[in-house]
Amino acid sequence: MNTIVSVVVITSMTLALGITLLSISNGLYLSATQQSAGELTGEILQLKTKFGIEHTFSVNGIIEVWVYNLGDTSIEVIGVDVYQIGGTPRPPEVLGSTSLLHLEEGQLGYVDVASKGLTGRVLVRLYAIASPLFEEHETTNFKYSEWMEVAINL
Amino acid sequence: MRSTFKDRRGISGVIAALFLVVILFSIVAPFMIQERTRQGLRDGAYRERREVDRMQAEESVDALAFLQGNRIRIRVTNTGPIQISVVRVWLNETILWEDVSLGIGDTREIETGQYVGEGECFRVQLTTDRGNFIVPKGSPVRRPVGGGLAGYPYALQIVVLNLAPDIVGSATGPNMLNYTFLVFRVVDILACAPDYADHNSGKPPNGVQPFFVAYALNTPQAACGAEVDTYVVYIHIEGIPGSGGKTIDLWASKWPDYATVSVPNSLLLTFDYSSGCFVDYTKVKK
């Protein structure tokens, strides 16, 4: 009889311990899954983000920057900065948190940016992010943005 | 009854061990499976991106923009190992939407219909569907005042090929180039020297222009006062490539033909006036 009791007790304890561990591991797993799924989505969408600055020209102090979306995802242009060669471009988080231009796959479009009174040879840097990663007024995902730069004469 | 219980001694330990193994497996396995899946997805995305970049880099085009009847035409030859499609032509700030497919080795001419008035100048650029932006040789297309190109049939145009399209930095693109151009000199023109040996030396406009007409030759026969069948132009070019490239290719063209020279280097161009064609060139190593 004692043996039966001991078997039942040990089995119950093992089950209880197992269920507890399973619950904890499930919780950890779910939490880790949610976190890493976000990171994975960000990394994959960043790889799918590909664009080119096809053409730029300046008219009356406004630079028109034509962007060609070459990637496998729609993109949002989130910032354009004009700065003198040798200077430091501002990151997209500083430039704003709204979309300046939405481009579907294979689409061409343009954004206007003020030349800020700069003259001579300047650099135009454009930041874009995959549309699914973009949230209005939210810059957390800007780490997954891509940039491209061209030099133009003003 | 007793013997049965005796036989089952130690079973609880085995069951517990089995449970533990199952528990440990159920803890570790999802993480491993998840990591494998994640890595697979990441690798797949990398592979796709590499393939797209490779296809884009494999595109190779020889393009030439020229005037025909004062309208701009563009001759495009696919010199790469894959089919390409020209989807847009830029003429200054104007877009022409095109759909010109070229198989390997194919040559096609694009009639833009763009009329070029006297003194007008058009920068030409082609876009392929894979996102290569090509500035044809001969761009910007100019029509000089007073007789147009007919008045300057032997204009030497210098095109710094690998400056275009002015991309100096990019997170992902292949065109990293910084560039300083110091001196360009047409040192001597051997034939008809009294009339043409004016040593048209100097820097190109603004020092960094990728395109400029270096020398325009007017009807040399008349200037020499005698019939001339061939005419030789000696060009010496110097430059300092920037950090993006070890050499700068320059094109000296007698429209619509051209030759190439690396920097620093010299070039002899021979023009055959009887046929009006560029017939030969000789590289003179410095």
Image (cartoon, grey):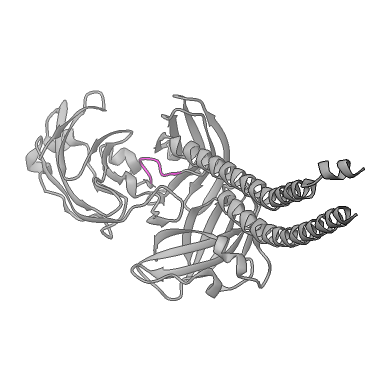
> Along the horizontal axis of the image, is B111 left or right of B144?
right
> Along the horizontal axis of the image, is B34 left or right of A58?
right
Quarter that holds the C terminus of chain B: top left
Is residue B136 magenta-colored? yes
Residue at image point 66% right, 61% down:
A35
Count the labels in the image.
0
Considering only vertical position in the picture, is B81 above or below B157? above
Residue at image point 55% right, 55% down:
A67
- Please identify the quarter of the rendering in which residue A101 is found: bottom right
Foreground pick, A97 / A110:
A97
The x, y position of residue B221, in whole percent, is 17, 33
- Please identify the quarter of the rendering in which residue B125 is found: top left
Q: From this viewpoint, is residue B35 visible?
A: yes
Name the residue furthest right.
Answer: B1
The x, y position of residue B158, in whole percent, is 27, 45
Quarter that holds the N terminus of chain B: top right
Foreground pick, B45 / B143:
B45
The x, y position of residue B26, in whole percent, is 72, 50
Q: From this viewpoint, is residue B146 visible?
A: no
Considering only vertical position in the picture, is B3 above or below A136? above
Q: Which residues are magenta?
A: B133-139
> Along the horizontal axis of the image, is A99 left or right of A120?
right
Residue at image point 58% right, 44% down:
B45
The x, y position of residue A39, in whole percent, is 62, 58
Foreground pick, B193 / A99:
A99
Foreground pick, B79 / B74:
B79
Considering only vertical position in the picture, is B79 above or below A90? above
